[in-house]
Amino acid sequence: MGSVRRMWRVGRLCLIAAFLWSDAGAQEKVRLSHSALETSNSVWFIAQELGMYKKYGLDSELLFIPSTTTSLTSLLAGDMQIANVSGGAIASAVLAGAQTAIVACYLNSLPYELVVNEAIKSPEELKGKSIGISRLGSASDVAARVLLRYLNLEPDKQVPIMQVGGSSERAAAFRAGRIAGFPSPPGIIHLTKGMPFRILISTADFKQRFEFPYICAATTRSYLQRNRETVKRVIMAHVEAVHFVKTRKDESKKIMSKYARTSNEDYLESAYSATARLYDTVPLVTRPGVEGQIREAITTARKPGAQLRFEDMVDESIVRELDKSGFIEKIYKK
């Protein structure tokens, strides 16, 4: 009888140990989305490819949803927990009452150039011709309007803006003659396969860097409150992915090539160089960039009396915590 009791106790201890082991090894499920296959979004898919989310205890599913505005809609619908968005999309959503927040931003400028047909040699010659973007409210839409205004052209009124699709789709529409030009991240023009083109203006030509929260991670306020540790782990994985991009060029380009579905070396070299240079080590959000998008959102929504503050659409507490703890510094000392 005593041996039976001992066996029962041993069995119970084994069950408890097995439960504790499985619980410790459990991965927190999280659904993420990125909105483009260009190198600027590589922080998301490099973290996925190299198991960085898993390293920080996450069982991640990474979805590709073209356009930050669509990605934000899916986030608000609860289809995912953390999404890649731009500041413009978040500003418009929060102004409309959405309870969302940017929690980290990895690229705080808008590295875009306005690609036009080679026959267009001046801004005046662009009047009446269409420019292609992905979707209204997206980063490409913001870029198109900023670049056109810099050339003293009125978007929509003087230069029609068409929703075409992602950068590769815009390049294809340009090649087919459906549009006269399109705002493009660095390097995309190399994918137009010999189509005569001209860079009419680039944000790199601006006298001051155009501050814009471009590649950012956002979630809902409710999810952040309930799952702060999960959000923190995602940001930790992204910090490591940014470090990888900055320090492992050849390996990064190989992964970028896979997602962009091209081996065009001119594109990969140009796009990688811009991304590695512009990615921020500490992913805080640009205040001037956010404030600019708040003004743009209020103007677009025709709500001149609306009040929206930086803090209404940004929560930097996790990034500041990671920075203060020495986590980011430790990553860069590897």
Image (cartoon, rainbow, N blue to C red):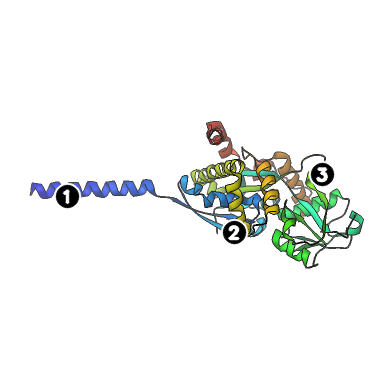
Per the model, the C-alpha gap separating discs 1 and 2 is: 51 Å
The amino acid type found where label 1 is placed reads Trp
The amino acid type found where label 2 is placed reads Phe
The amino acid type found where label 3 is placed reads Asp
Q: Would residue 83 be seen by someone viewing this image from the given angle? A: no
Q: Earlier in the sequence, mark 3 or mark 1?
A: 1
In this image, 302 relative to 333: left or right?
Answer: right
Foreground: disc 3 or disc 1: 3
Per the model, the C-alpha gap separating discs 2 and 3 is: 31 Å
Which residue bears the numbered disc 1? 8
Pointers 3 and 1 in contact (C-beta within 8 Å): no
Which residue bears the numbered disc 2? 64
In this image, 202 relative to 247: left or right?
Answer: right
Report x, y in % for residue 157. 87, 60
* Secondary structure beneath label 3: helix
Which residue bears the numbered disc 3? 205
